[in-house]
Image: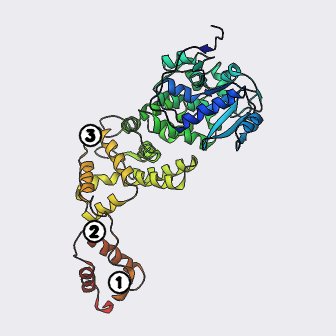
Amino acid sequence: MDNPGVLYETMEEDTRDTGAMRDAALQAANRLQEAGFAAFWAGGCVRDMLLGRPPADYDIATGAVPDQVCALFPGAVAVGKSFGVVRAPVNGLFLEVATFRRDHSYTDGRRPESVSFSDPPTDASRRDFTVNALFYDPVADEIHDYVNGRADLDARLIRCVGDPALRFSEDYLRMLRAVRFASTLEFSIEPATRSAIEENAALISAISSERIRVEITRALVESPRAGEALELLDSAGLLAHILPEVVAMKGQEQPPAFHPEGDVFRHTVLMLNEITAPSPELAWAVLLHDVGKPPTARMGPDRIRFDGHAEHGAAMAREIMRRLHFSSEQIDTVTRCVRDHMRFMSVPNMKRSTLRKMVGAPTFPVELELHRVDCVASHGDTSNYDTLTRFQQEMADEPILPDPWVTGNDLIKLGLREGPELGAWKRKAYELQLEEKAENKQVLLEWISSQLPPANT
C-alpha cells in the first residue's frame, strides 16, 4: 500500500442520507479538488456513515487556506480565519470548511493559542478521539485513517488520539464529550482514556456552564439509555463536579412499598432509561424530579418521609438550571414539572374541572410522560396515567380549556367591585362551567346573582 493512511475500500452507501446537505458536501469537495486542493469529509459525518447512521452535518477538511476557500465560494464567511475555518455557501446551504492544521500550545483548557496550517496526518493527530479523526474522499471514494479509527469503530471504543492526559489538558470539555459519545453510540471508553478522565475530572469545573449544559443535555436526549449515561458520568468522576445535587441522591433510601427498585439515584437511572427520544425539558425534569428528597428526608413513625420534597426540589431545579444558563422558558417548564409531579397521586379524586385545567396546561405532555416513567421505574401502577389518557381521548373533539363564559365586566354589572371577591367569583364561575354544572352563560349568571347578598343585586 503506497499510503499507509489510506484504506482502499468503498464506503457502503447510506440509503437514509441522500439529502441536500450530502449533495452540497459532495459538490464542495469536487470544487476544491478541481482547484487542485485536497478536500475530504471529516470527523463525525465519516464516523456516522461508517456506522450506518445518518450524519447530522458535513464538515470539509482541505489543503486550501481561508482566502483560497473564500475565493472559490463567493459569499463565504471566515468565522474563524485564524483557525482556518470558513462557512461556505453551497446550493443555499452553509458548510464548515476548515484548513488542515496543527494546534499549538493550550493554556486555558479550551482552545489553542495559535495554529499553523499543515497536512491530513497532522490534522488527524490533533483531534479528540480516533473515531472522530477519520477522513473520507467522496470523489475517489477512499477512507483516510491515520489513527486506527476504523479499528476502534469495529471494537466500539472511544479512545483519545495520542496521549489521553494531553488531549484532555488541551480541552477539558473532551472528558464530557467522551461520555456523550460512549453513551449515544453505545460504545465503551478505552481503559487509558477512562483513567485519564477519572484523574482529571475536577478540571471540568473550569469549563463554562453553557458548554457543560450542551454536552449533558445531548447525552440525556440522544442516548438510547440515558440512565446509563448518568451512571457513566458518575463513575467517571464528572457528575460530582457538575451536579453534586444529583450525586446526593445516591444512597438515599426510599420506602420499599413504593420504591422496590432502591435509592433515589437508582430510581432516576431507571426512569432515564425508560424515556425514548425525549425533549430536553423532559430529560431534565426526569433527572431533577426527586432532587429535593435528600435534603427533606426524615424518619417518620412508620417509614421514611420526604415532606415538601416536590416544592423544595423545584427551587433546587430552578437554581441548577440557572447555574447552567438554560432559557427562562425551559427553567419554568422543568420547575413546574418538578413542583407538580406529586399531584398525579390525587387524580382519582379530582373534579372534572381540575382535570381539564391539568390536561389543558401547556406543560402537560411533559408532565404526563414524567408521571408514566415515574410509575414504571418504581411501583409499576400506571392506573392514574391510564385515567388521564382516557380523559384526553374523551376531550379530543372539544377544546379542553374553552374560553370563560363569565367575564369581570359581567360580574361588575351584577354589582361586584374590582378586587379579590370578584376574582374569586370569576374562578368559581369558570370551575362550574368546566364541571358542566350550567347549561349556558345566562344560567350561570342567574345562579351567581342568586348567591350574592342583597347589597350586590
Q: Position of residue 84 (x, y in %)?
A: 73, 34
Q: Of the residues under marks 2 and 1, which one precedes in the sequence? A: 1
In the picture, residue 97 is in which quadrant?
top right
Is the residue marked by circle 3 packed among few (<14), some (14-19), or many (20+) residues within 10 Å? some
Q: For residue 57, say whether it is visible.
A: no
- Where is 31 relative to 3, above or below? below
Select label 3 or label 1 by which is in front: 1
The one of 129 and 313 positioned closer to us in this rendering: 129
Residue 3 horizontal side relative to residue 280, left or right: right
Name the image quarter holding the C terminus: bottom left
Q: Position of residue 138 (x, y in %)?
A: 58, 25
Q: CA distance from mark 2 to mark 1?
A: 18 Å
What residue is drawn where x is 57% and y is 18%?
149
Residue identifier under label 2: 434
Q: Secondary structure at mark 2?
A: helix
The one of 58 and 37 positioned closer to us in this rendering: 37
Residue 257 horizontal side relative to residue 298, left or right: left
Are the residues flagged by discs 3 and 1 in contact, CB closer than 8 Å?
no
Residue identifier under label 1: 411
Residue identifier under label 3: 380
Q: CA distance from mark 3 to mark 1?
A: 47 Å
Select label 3 or label 2 by which is in front: 2
Q: Of the residues under marks 3 and 1, which one precedes in the sequence? A: 3
- Where is 450 relative to 27, above or below? below
Q: Of the residues under marks 3 and 2, which one precedes in the sequence? A: 3
What residue is drawn where x is 26% and y is 82%?
442
Specify the amino acid type for callout 2. Leu
In the picture, residue 26 is in which quadrant?
top right
Q: Position of residue 88 (x, y in %)?
A: 67, 39
